[in-house]
Each structure stands twice: as C-alpha cells, then as structure tokens.
Amino acid sequence: MPDLTQARQSVLEGIEASGRAGTFSLLPPLSRLNYRGRISTVGRVAAAFGVEPAMEPCRAAIFGDRAALWLGPDEWLLLAKEGEARSIIDRLAIALAPLSYSLVDVSHRQVALKIAGPQAELLLNAGCPLDLDRQAFPVGMCTRTLLQKTEIVLWRVAETEFHIEVARSFAPYAWRFLEQAERDL
Amino acid sequence: MLLIDCPFCGKRPELEFRYGGEAHLARPADPADLGDKAWGQFLYGRSNPRGVHAERWRHVHGCGRFFNALRDTTNDRFAATYKIGEERPAIPEAEGAASA
Ligand SMILES: [Zn+2]
C-alpha cells in the first residue's frame, strides 16, 4: 500500500489560520485505528500496542504518546503518532492471531481539534449537551457524542483541555460552528 | 432535556439515541413453516400499548449499542433500561398505572 502521508492535504486549508490563538485549534495528524473485539482479546492488544485499553466505560488510557479510548463495550479508538498505523496493524495481527477481531485504519477519516482554556467547557456546551462539570466529566473521560449536528469523540485530556475527533468531511462545519460559538462567549 | 440511562454509559441526553421499535420480538425459528397471516403478524403486528412499552433503543452517538427500555407511552417516562438478553424487569405498580 503506497504511503499517502506526504500527499495529505488538510481539510481545513483555507479555513484554518495556523498558529491560531483562541480557545480551539487544529491538532497535527495522528495514526488512528478502530479496534473491535471480545474483552478476552484486550490483553493481547495491550501487550502489542503498549497501552492497556480501559474496561471502564468512557475512559481513556494513555502511555507515552499513545492512547486507547473506550468507545463501546467491545470498541476502542487507538491513537498514535502519525505514520505508525502500518506497524501497529502488523504487530496486532501477530499478537491476535488466530482470534477474530476487527481493526480498521481510520487515520484519515478524522481530524483532531484541541479546545483549551478557562472557557473550553462553555465553548463546547454551545453545541454539546453533556454535563462537562469536572465531577461529571473528569480528566481521562472520553465518549462519542454530538457537537451541534455532527458526531464527535470528546476526550478531556486535562482540567481545561479537551481533544475532539471529528469526521474529516464535517471538520469545516465543526470549525465554523466553534468560530461562531466563540464569538458568542 | 430528557436523559436516557444507557446500560453502558449512564444517563445521557436524548439526542444521542435512536428508537429501535418494540423489544422482545423473537423471529420465528422456521419462517418457511409460517402462513402469510402469521408471518405478517411477525413483521407488522405490534402491541402499541397505552402505558408501559418494552422497546429497543440504540445509543447511536455514544457507545453504539442497542439496549431495551421500559417507557410509558403516555408521559414519555423511562421506568427502566436493561441490556439486550436480560429479562424484562418488573416495575412498581405506581409507575405503570398510567393506563388504568
Ligand atoms: Zn451508551
């Protein structure tokens, strides 16, 4: 499979002002893998990927620059540095054989945005109906949810910092929505 | 906003869910043995109660899982939610008395 990484073009080109100051910004590209399999397979994923996927619902596990986000009772989103997807798939294939599982490279399906600062929750709540109080949505919590009309994965990486994953084709919409919401803060 | 208690994720806003029709409808083991009437009943016959209704929901913008719920069709109150494969729970009389 040819490496298309070099030919990659940001979906926000022409929209996103790089080095943007404000509550939200674009994060660099990542490797993303959607893993689905029985709970009994997760130990092997942990050994091969280097992060022990959380069993507790809506929790992210991190180790170094890798993360495993719980998306469902048999579904995790694995995040790693750009360009590592191929080698991770190969390692997992060895570790998981001959079990059945699903592992899909979704690196280019989504883009990541960072929402940070004292008004991060307020900005998100302009379009996200979840309770983002630090008790209700603590650091390390992650979930699929909605941002206005688009689905996102929302992950609180620090007290005042969120990582969101949005479908590539919906990124310009999410971006424009956040711009508008930021003006209204 | 109405909160629905996903058996996996906990209480979440209604917007994240999709309705999935009546629950506990078992597909006939051997459809070829059924007459048109019985097959039609399986496909289209629904209890459509006034009061507590067992129905499927999917946490589509969350964990993605289907689950079952008991909801009162007269006031939209959810009496219980439970995982697929679990028994329909008994609910206290007071909650299911709306149709009386
Ligand atoms: Zn859920």
Image (cartoon, coloured by chain):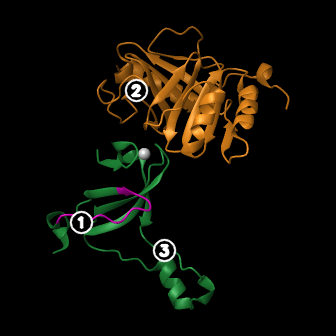
Q: Hue of chain B?
A: green
Placement of B81 over or under A28, stated as above or below:
below
- Residue position for label 3: B26
Residue in the picture at 30% in, 26% down:
A133
**Residue B74 numbered mark, or none:** 1
Q: Is residue A11 left or right of residue B59?
A: right
Separation of residues labelled 2 and 3 (CA atoms): 42 Å
Please indicate, yes or no, whether residue A169 appears anywhere in the rendered image: no
Looking at this view, is A136 or A37 the one in front? A37
Q: Are marks 3 and 1 on the same chain?
A: yes
Say which label, 3 or 1, has the lower sequence index. 3
Q: Which chain is orange?
A: A
Looking at this view, is A121 or A46 the one in front? A46
The chain that hosts pointer 1 is: B
Separation of residues labelled 3 and 1 (CA atoms): 26 Å
Looking at the rendered image, the disc whose residue lies closer to the viewer, 3 or 1, is: 3
For badge 2, the amino acid type reads Leu
Q: Is residue A7 left or right of residue B59?
A: right
Label 2 close to label 3 by CB (< 8 Å): no
How many other residues sit within 10 Å of disc 1, few (<14), some (14-19) or many (≥20)? few
For badge 1, the amino acid type reads Thr
Q: Are marks 2 and 3 on the same chain?
A: no
